[in-house]
Amino acid sequence: MAKRGKFGARLYLMDTNMVLVVQTVKRGTAENAPYVIDQRPTSGKERFVSVTDDKGIADAIRDALEGRL
């Protein structure tokens, strides 16, 4: 099984025009540790993207998964 990353992403449809991408972080070191909303002060934590901007959504998810959101 591949090792899971430290960061993740949650997506929320805010309305018919906007998606909110929120960065998550793994809470513990166990394989099944939950991912929780990232509360670090240095993290941007979230990005709003137009629902029709496929590249923008993909970039925001990629940034969240790499801990750069």
Image (cartoon, grey):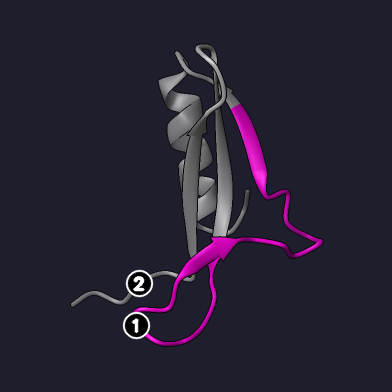
* Cα distance in 3D space between marks 1 and 2: 8 Å
User: In the rendered structure, does residue 30 fall within the stretch colored magenta?
Assistant: yes
Q: Quadrant of the N terminus?
A: bottom left
As drawn, the label of residue 4 is 2
- Residue 33 sits in quarter: bottom left
Picture coordinates of residue 6 (x, y %)?
Answer: 49, 71
Describe the element under mark 1 as helix, strand or loop: loop
**Relative to 57, is 20 on the left or the right?**
right
Q: What residue is drawn where x is 63% and y is 29%?
A: 48
Q: What residue is drawn where x is 31% and y is 77%?
A: 3
Q: What residue is drawn where x is 58% and y is 46%?
A: 22
Vertical comparison of 8 with 31: above or below = above
Describe the element under mark 2 as helix, strand or loop: loop
Q: Amino acid at mark 2?
A: Arg
Vertical comparison of 5 with 49: above or below = below
Q: Which residues are magenta?
A: 25-48
**Relative to 53, is 37 on the left or the right?**
right
Furthest-left residue in view? Answer: 1
Pick the residue in front: 8 or 67: 8
**Relative to 16, is 39 on the left or the right?**
right
Mark 1, residue position: 31
Q: What residue is drawn where x is 73% and y is 56%?
A: 43
